[in-house]
């Protein structure tokens, strides 16, 4: 049976398309953006996550220690609890030994241990998001499919989209654009809006920082526009990467070339709120260290795009 691997489902989302939405986040991504605020999305397989501040310690709990078949858990160091400031002994995880069987997760009542990456059938996921239909109907919202890069699971996403449209649910698809256009052709009839990431217009810079060039991304955006797709461009504003007036103007000129296909441009100011997530899954990915852009900086970049006659919003 076809299944999709999901790492999060967020209800009452208001920044991933029009109205109130349910955003479903799928595992796996071909890009390696150093500022990624969802590092748990990068790998295609499920991963163990440990949120240390939720752990109440070996003394009060410790149930996870005796259930791991790989003996990957043991008593660890004593620390001050982040909230209560009491001394507690944390667990120690041998990450290389973990096979994400979930035995420890089942015993963790504080939910400090979780599995990032749960398999759903199409029926199960449709049933889950359909619970929020009253919110969609009252707000003009719907379901947003995000990631990672959700189209790395193309067959599941296609079937999911078809089922959503059968229920007349508005659909938005958040994509990096870095995949074969034949996949876009298949999902286009069932996608009301593409949330399309645009990170940098210089191919060499794009490849050096993110790991892939932008040729395919730009080509796919042009083809989507020609084929009638509605596109909301999302530009993450990243210090020392694309936050110069020249970089934003170049992106704006590209958006203008897509003409009426572009419904809105979102500027997404960099934030470092996702850094702690790298620790939770012991990710070895490179992480950007930078200060978030100021409101004044974002306002000046927004004006550049508006002066080009483009609709712009900041999130």
Image (cartoon, rainbow, N blue to C red):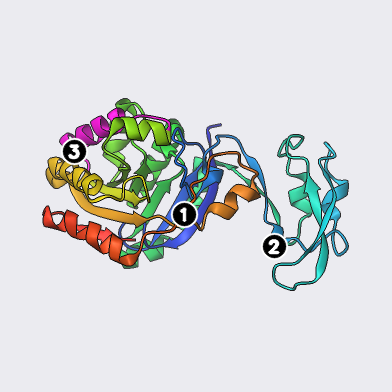
Seen at 53% across and 51% down, the residue is 8
Q: Nearer the viewer, residue 255 or 100?
A: 255
Q: Is residue 267 magenta?
A: no
Residue 178, visible in the rendered structure: no
Q: Quadrant of residue 82?
A: bottom right
Residue that badge 1 annotates? 129
Horizontal side of residue 168 vs 76, given as left or right: left
Residue 204 image position (x, y, % from top left): 32, 30
Mark 3 → mark 2, Cα distance in angstroms: 46 Å
**Callout 3 secondary element:** helix
Horizontal side of residue 218 vs 104, given as left or right: left
Q: Earlier in the sequence, mark 3 or mark 2?
A: 2
The answer to whether the residues at label 3 and label 1 have Cβ atoms under 8 Å apart is: no
Q: Which residues are magenta?
A: 211-229
Image quadrant where one finds the N terminus: top right
Residue that badge 3 annotates? 225
Seen at 26% across and 60% down, the residue is 313
**Callout 1 secondary element:** helix
Q: Which-is-in-front pick, marks 3 and 1?
A: 3
Q: Which-is-in-front pick, marks 3 and 2?
A: 2
Which is the main secondary structure of the residues drawn in magenta? helix
**Callout 2 secondary element:** helix
Residue that badge 2 annotates? 53
Q: Nearer the viewer, residue 255 or 3?
A: 255
């Amino acid at each position: 049976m076809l299944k999709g691997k999901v790492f999060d489902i967020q209800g009452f989302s208001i920044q991933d398309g029009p109205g109130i939405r349910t955003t479903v986040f799928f595992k796996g991504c071909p890009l390696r953006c150093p500022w990624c605020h969802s590092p748990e999305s990068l790998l295609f397989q499920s991963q163990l996550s440990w949120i240390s501040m939720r752990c109440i310690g070996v003394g009060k709990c410790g149930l996870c220690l005796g259930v791991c078949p790989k003996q990957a858990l043991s008593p660890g160091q004593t620390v001050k609890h982040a909230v209560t400031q009491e001394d507690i002994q944390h667990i120690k995880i041998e990450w290389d030994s973990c096979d994400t069987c979930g035995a420890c997760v089942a015993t963790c009542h504080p939910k400090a241990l979780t599995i990032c990456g749960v398999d759903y059938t199409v029926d199960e996921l449709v049933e889950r998001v359909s619970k929020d239909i009253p919110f969609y109907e009252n707000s003009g919202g719907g379901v947003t499919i995000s990631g990672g890069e959700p189209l790395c699971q193309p067959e599941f996403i296609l079937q999911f989209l078809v089922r959503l449209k059968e229920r007349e649910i508005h659909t938005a698809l958040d994509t990096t654009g870095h995949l074969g256009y034949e996949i876009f052709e298949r999902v286009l009839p069932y996608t009301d809006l593409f949330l399309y990431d645009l990170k940098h217009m210089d191919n060499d810079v794009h490849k050096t920082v993110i790991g892939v060039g932008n040729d395919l991304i730009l080509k796919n955006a042009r083809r989507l526009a020609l084929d009638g797709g509605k596109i909301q461009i999302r530009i993450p504003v990243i210090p020392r990467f694309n936050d110069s007036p020249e970089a934003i103007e170049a992106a704006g000129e590209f958006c203008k070339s897509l003409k009426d296909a572009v419904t809105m441009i979102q500027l997404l100011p960099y934030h470092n709120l996702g850094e702690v997530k790298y620790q939770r899954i012991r990710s070895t990915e490179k992480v950007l260290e930078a200060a978030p852009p100021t409101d004044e900086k974002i306002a000046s970049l927004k004006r550049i795009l508006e002066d080009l006659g483009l609709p712009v919003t900041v999130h």
